[in-house]
Image: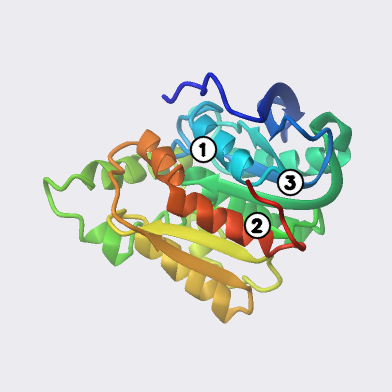
């Protein structure tokens, strides 16, 4: 587990509670120390393969992100893990958090102007699904989605997943994904549900612009890029970037990868295209 960064220049953290689908959830707000209220909010969901993880997983990443884009506040929220309740508990929590944020703007220090949803790995699955749920349920409005090395295919059917060689460094990642889906989706019929497997969805129109970051040597690479291609074919403005090879042998490595300058640059640039000029540090 990554420990919170002791000092983040110009970034303030606040521990709060938000409302999930069935009860309160721990959450953390990141904001520029120089600003009291911002127009732009990112709601972020952590990694952990649906079965583990907490707010500390991406603490360093989110601190650095807010340093890069001080016009944004970030609300990072926990969600129900599969060991407590399997699908659809996590996605219902994620969508409930978006609705809570819209209704409780003052608790975040946000004006309510625009909201982006984001996540890493399993959290990126939840972020992608939240765009589908918000479209299908009519709220809340989202202006963008940021998916970092997302888990999108419970069938583990892509070439980059199936071609992991025995003994390869990435074999642990592939095996971990398989175990995670067994915990998250114990009912095999759920594996084709679009709220579990966005990659298999046939209804991807009218979604917010997307930034999808994959990694060259990540078994999740092909499903990320296939999803980007499907979004594009459905008329969704999509930016797809493949990061240079990095170690992804455990969940923490995904967050370390996200902290790399190239990824932060891509995210900052994408956020700046969504709703007008964005000042960056």
**Circle 1/circle 2 CB separation < 8 Å:** no
Residue in the image at 35% along x and 45% along y: 177
Which type of secondary structure does the marked residue at label 1 adopt? helix
- Label 2 CA crowd tier, 10 Å (few <14, some 14–19, many 20+): many
Q: How far apart are marks 2 and 3 (CA)?
A: 10 Å
Number of marks drawn: 3
Q: Which of marks 3 and 1 is in front?
A: 3
Res. 7 in view: yes
Q: Distance between the residues labelled 1 and 2?
A: 15 Å
Q: Looking at the image, is mark 3 or mark 1 earlier in the sequence? A: 1
Going by the picture, which residue comes out furthest to the top? 6
Which type of secondary structure does the marked residue at label 2 adopt? helix
Residue named by callout 3:
71
* Whole-percent x, y for residue 249 in the image: 28, 40
**Circle 3/circle 1 CB separation < 8 Å:** no
- Label 3 CA crowd tier, 10 Å (few <14, some 14–19, many 20+): many
Q: Looking at the image, is mark 1 or mark 2 earlier in the sequence? A: 1
* Whole-percent x, y for residue 197 in the image: 50, 57
Residue in the image at 30% along x and 48% along y: 246
Q: Is residue 29 above or below residue 39?
A: above
Residue named by callout 2:
271
The N terminus lies in quadrant: top left
**Circle 2/circle 3 CB separation < 8 Å:** no
Residue named by callout 1:
61
Q: In which quarter of the image is residue 94?
A: top right
Residue in the image at 15% along x and 48% along y: 168
Q: In which quarter of the image is residue 178?
A: top left
* Whole-percent x, y for residue 281 in the image: 63, 46
């Amino acid at each position: 587990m990554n420990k919170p960064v002791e000092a983040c220049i110009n970034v303030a953290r606040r521990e709060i509670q938000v409302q999930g689908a069935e009860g309160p959830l721990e959450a953390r707000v990141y904001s520029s120390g120089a600003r009291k209220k911002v127009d732009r909010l990112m709601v972020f969901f952590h990694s952990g393969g649906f079965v583990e993880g907490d707010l500390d997983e991406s603490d360093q990443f989110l601190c650095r992100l807010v340093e890069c884009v001080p016009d944004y506040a970030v609300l990072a929220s926990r969600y129900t893990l599969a060991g407590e309740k399997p699908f659809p508990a996590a996605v219902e929590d994620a969508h409930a958090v978006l609705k809570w944020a819209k209704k409780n703007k003052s608790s975040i220090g946000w004006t309510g102007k625009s909201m982006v949803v984001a996540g890493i790995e399993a959290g990126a699955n939840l972020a992608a699904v939240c765009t589908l749920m918000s479209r299908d349920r009519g709220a809340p409005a989202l202006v963008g989605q940021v998916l970092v090395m997302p888990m999108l295919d419970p069938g583990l059917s892509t070439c980059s997943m199936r071609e992991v060689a025995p003994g390869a460094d990435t074999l642990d990642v592939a095996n971990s994904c398989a175990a995670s889906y067994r915990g998250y989706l114990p009912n095999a019929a759920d594996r084709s549900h679009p709220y579990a497997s966005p990659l298999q969805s046939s209804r991807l129109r009218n979604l917010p612009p997307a930034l999808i970051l994959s990694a060259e040597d990540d078994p999740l690479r092909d499903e990320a890029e296939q999803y980007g291609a499907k979004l594009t074919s459905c008329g969704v403005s999509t930016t797809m970037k493949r990061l240079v090879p990095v170690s992804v042998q455990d969940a923490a490595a995904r967050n370390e990868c996200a902290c790399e300058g190239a990824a932060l640059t891509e995210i900052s640039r994408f956020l700046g295209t969504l709703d007008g000029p964005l000042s960056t540090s």
